[in-house]
Image: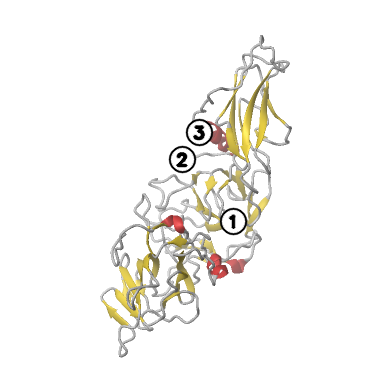
Amino acid sequence: MRPTVIFTTLITLSIFLHGSGCTRIESPVRYTEEDQDNPEGASPELLIVPDKNEIFDTEPLRLQATGGKGEITWGTEPQFENSFLPATGDLVLFSPPDISADTYLTIIAKDQNNKTARAEILIIDEGLPPGPGDILINEIAWAGTLKNWRDEYIELINKTDRAFYIDFWSIENMAGSGNSFYFSGKIAPGGLFLITNYVEDSENTAISASVDYADSGLSIPNTAFGPFILKNYEGMIFDTVGDGGSYRLGENSAEVKASMSRYNSSTSTVWEPESWYTETLSLNLLDGTMGTPGARNSGETGSAGASGDSAIAIITEYSIDAGDEIGEDWVELFIIKSGSIRDFILTDLDGTDLSITNWKDIEVEEEQYILVVWGRSSDEEPYRNEGNRFYIPDNPPTGTKDELVILCKGSYLDGLCYYSTGDVQFDDVETILGIGWTGDPIFGKHASRKIDDNGLYMDDLGAFSWDTVAAPTPGAAN
């Protein structure tokens, strides 16, 4: 469902329930007074219309009761407590129980005259629901943007390889101090969930990323640092950020606005200042505000607005084959921030790799492509730069499986894992998982990073973001 601007907790639920028309199932359960098998008290005037008749046990279900008299109450067989939100009414949200096997469950609606209607639902086991640490607060733009101080956003991250419904979750103190902010949606495996103050394409926002949930009720206090407490609909605490004091991270001045971001390797569910930093990269923001809404955090530290002269890049293509001759294996980098690539190291995490320029200060421009080619070009000149090609004497990565990571001054910029045989056991899996890899390697000796509907390179660090059948385009857009 497309993000909708809403204002209060009750309206949040109302939008979820009313946001799209109910779809009647082909044969809704309905009895008449004359039916021999009619349950006691059944009424031809009362009918349950579910959105679906099959759901996952992590997926809420919208239910509508038509007909009947007075207030409608809800129940199930077998009975589960606190399953309906609100507890009574013509339109409710049913949260299924966590089950260990596919189960049929009967939904029961009853009117004030005790007349009932029933509908049978199949609940499909999708595994364990998320627990604390599986979904975390990833970035907080408490100062807004240079364009608009109200242009705030908060981003969640899914640290698992499974998708989850996060309907009617909340974050304490995100709707002003002392008030909880409620939201709903679905977060992809290893994905991000972006919550903003303004809908996409609003003239009031500098954010160019796709928005997962927009609500004008988002109001992040500037004078009290939370605590921001992420909870599911049952009140289970998943993450806590802040201590209620003053902000020590992020920046809010007339010249510089910067978000506070979680280190990609952090999995802490309690407030730990050392797990966070002031963002120094501006990505998916049209006004130069420092932040990365809808994209992975840079993982770098420094003074916002003065992140040094270093460029920032992502990997957009690679070609590596065990049968290649020297000089035929390469990786393409796309520059997303102009600057020097003196401190760029393209590594397979074996600890022996050096600067791709041999520590020479070489400037590159934003949106430029450069190629890093493995293999000594000559004994006299082991490092060589020809146009946008940089030849390095390091040993190339393993042709059948390996990690590729860009480091700058020791900080992670981007990375991937690939393989071309049945062996997918990586030597440094814990390291690359800690810097954001989803655990889903690319199967292919060559792959090109895909481009999304907005014309931007996809940022998910897994196989989904890569095309393994596209023709190579070294040094040019994919």
Q: Residue furthest bottom?
A: 380
- Give SS at disc 3: loop
Image x and y of residue 31, in percent? 64, 16
Q: Which residue is mark 3?
A: 19
The answer to whether the residue labelled 2 contacts the one labelled 1, judged by CB atoms less than 8 Å apart, is no
> Where does the image place residue 290, in percent across and percent down from the top left?
44, 62
Circle 2 SS class: loop
3D distance between C-alphas at marks 3 and 1: 27 Å
Q: To which residue does mark 2 refer? A: 2
Q: Which kind of residue does numbered mark 3 sit on?
A: Gly
Alpha carbon distance from label 2 to label 3: 9 Å
Using residue 9 as the reference point, say whether residue 390 is left or right of it.
Answer: left
First in sequence: mark 3 or mark 1? 3
Please tell me the numbered disc located at residue 136: 1
Percent across and percent down for residue 153 are 50, 52
Q: Residues within 10 Å of mark 3 (few under 14, many from 20)?
A: few
Which comes before the other along the chain, label 2 or label 1?
2
Spatial CA span between label 2 and label 1: 23 Å
Residue at the image position 65 percent from the left and 43 percent from the top: 233
Q: Nearer the viewer, residue 395 or 269?
A: 395
Q: Position of residue 201 (x, y in %)?
A: 38, 46
Indicate which disc, 2 or 3, sits on the residue closer to the N terminus. Answer: 2
Q: Quadrant of residue 370?
A: bottom left
Q: Amino acid at mark 2?
A: Arg
Type of the residue with mark 1: Leu
Residue 337 seen anywhere in this rendered image of the structure:
no
